[in-house]
Image (cartoon, coloured by chain):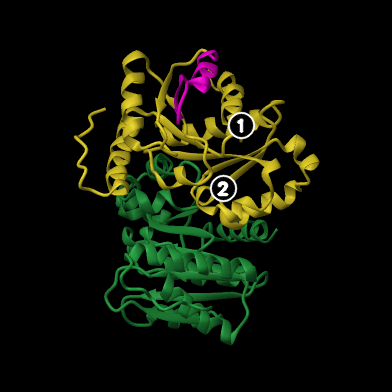
Chain colours: A green, B yellow
Amino acid sequence: MHIEQARFEEPVLKRNDEVAAQNRRFFLERGIFCVNLMGAPGAGKTTLLERLIPLLTPHVSVAVVEGDIAGDDDARRITACGVPVQQTNTYGACHLLAEQVAHAVDHLTQQSEFGLLFIENVGNLVCPAEFDLGEALRFVVYSATEGADKPRKYPLMFMRAGLVALNKADIAGAAGVEMADLRRSVAQVNPAAAVFTISAAKGDGVDDVAQWLLQRMEAFRG
Amino acid sequence: MHIEQARFEEPVLKRNDEVAAQNRRFFLERGIFCVNLMGAPGAGKTTLLERLIPLLTPHVSVAVVEGDIAGDDDARRITACGVPVQQTNTYGACHLLAEQVAHAVDHLTQQSEFGLLFIENVGNLVCPAEFDLGEALRFVVYSATEGADKPRKYPLMFMRAGLVALNKADIAGAAGVEMADLRRSVAQVNPAAAVFTISAAKGDGVDDVAQWLLQRMEAFRG
């Protein structure tokens, strides 16, 4: 993917939007369905990917960009799933930029062909929501144990999501969280999102998420 | 709705986002499901509202904010549907601002109570997409006769929509537009949106849109 030299006089968000638009065109031209996977640290993003990938690979070639402030723990876990992974470290930054994704995708396309790309964003329920990466779909994983009120308190990430997985549903009750309250909270900020209740650790509900993703990928490809 | 004095030294978008957040809280606290209805001039926004309102009013009290650059033609059409309408003229501006919505809603709440608010934005497929009004849902009406490629060419409005109505489907073929191509075009920029094929003029498909809106409104209220 060709990236113009960064023009540092421009505001970060405007520059990011331009590169995101380039990424989006790149993905569209190649029929790559790109999913920006976001959520707070510990929400279960990597665990969910470990569950989803084996359900998806019979239907489509999957690749993953792993965004982390530091380290490659998650990338090693996903590599063990047998799909190409590109690690991207932000060295302190609290979210990925479109340009980092462009470079990571450059590396990935040199080694393999794929039709479904997951970008696992930096664990953060706030900042990544402000940065378009060129994805077709924003997928938010939320840990139900963190309370039913958070979608209303941190609305932007939920507002921009097409897909929301409410994870750790199996232990939400033990944390005093009513799933019905949490679902309402999501619907209050984004009544149109597809919402699934899951336990990534146990695998509950993950098949429904996989089926939904495959169906939406087919619509994307037409 | 209390609105702080505008601080003109701030960028327009930042100020708008702040007022939009105030609007959103106002709507949430009062259980008002707010729908930002957008689309190009002539897409059929007002005609669709004329069809939708009688299907919705048996279930919920409806009010409408009519945004127009000039005139009150649309407001008079909606008034004839028997629901409260507040006209807002932008005097040249190509989109509504959250502050204009706040003032319009102030007027509406003084005269009536309502649970579903439509904001009919200025006819424009581009600019309104950049301005949050505090809505729970963005609803894009697109005239299928304008071509299957436009969602890809004007992606932001479609990317941010939860609901898309592809209008004038009955005459799209006569304009040389394949509905399957148009649906794919929407899915390429927003694979998660709910998409309905309708003819507002004939009423085809409008009942499905009304049912979807009522169901999402119930989820919003919990």
* Residue B63 lies in the magenta stretch: yes
**Residue at 64% from the left image edge and 28% from the top image edge:** B207
Residue A198 on the magenta span: no
Marks 1 & 2 on one chain: yes
Q: Is residue A80 visible?
A: no
Residue B37's x, y, as percent?
A: 50, 35
Tell me: residue B16, above or below residue B105.
below
Task: Give the answer, above or below, for where A55 lies relative to A178.
Answer: below
State which tag comes first along the sequence, 1 or 2: 1
| Residue that mark 1 sits on | B44
* Residue nearest the observer in this picture, B161 or A126: B161
User: What's drawn in magenta, residue-wise?
Assistant: B59-81
Q: Amino acid at mark 1?
A: Gly
Q: Which residue is mark 2?
A: B193
Q: Callout 1: residue from which chain?
A: B
Looking at the image, residue A188 lies above or below residue A56: above
In the drawing, does residue A84 fall left or right of residue B197? Answer: left
